Image (cartoon, rainbow, N blue to C red):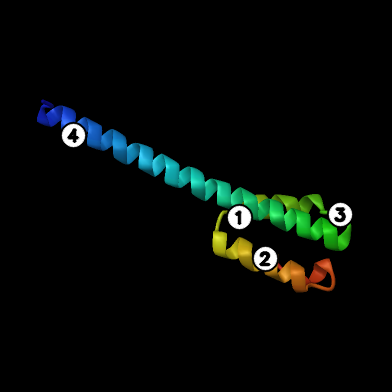
Amino acid sequence: MMTLTEKWKMEGLKKGIEQGLQQGLQQGLVEGLRQSIFDAVELKFGYVEDALKEKISRISDVDLLKEIHRKIILAKSLNDIII
């Protein structure tokens, strides 16, 4: 039988693992979106400027990254993509 303290420790450990997994999934999603943006720019315009890479690499908001990806798909030039 577990003591109350042991039970609390197990619950805390479980919460910590769940939070870690959630953060890992979020970080993976962000990295995947960034890479999709780089791939789309390179495919559409032939290259990805370092300045654009730096700006995109600083963005961690999933919705903003999705919006940027959509803009790239519709853009006629890199100037159409305002970040």
Name the amino acid, label 2: Ile
Q: Circles 1 and 2: CB distance less than 8 Å?
A: yes
- How far is the residue under mark 4 from the one under mark 1? 37 Å
Horizontal side of 31 relative to 42 (left or right) equals: left
Q: Earlier in the sequence, mark 4 or mark 1?
A: 4
- How far is the residue under mark 3 from the one under mark 1? 20 Å
Residue 47 is labelled as: 3
Of helix, strand and loop, which one carries label 3?
loop
Name the amino acid, label 4: Trp
Q: Nearer the viewer, mark 1 or mark 2?
A: 2
Horizontal side of 66 relative to 8 (left or right) equals: right
- How far is the residue under mark 4 from the one under mark 2? 44 Å
Name the amino acid, label 3: Tyr
Residue 59 is labelled as: 1
Q: Circles 3 and 1: CB distance less than 8 Å?
A: no
Q: Position of residue 51 (x, y in %)?
A: 77, 53
Residue 68 is labelled as: 2
Task: Give the residue at x 64% y 55%.
Answer: 33
Q: Circles 2 and 3: CB distance less than 8 Å?
A: no
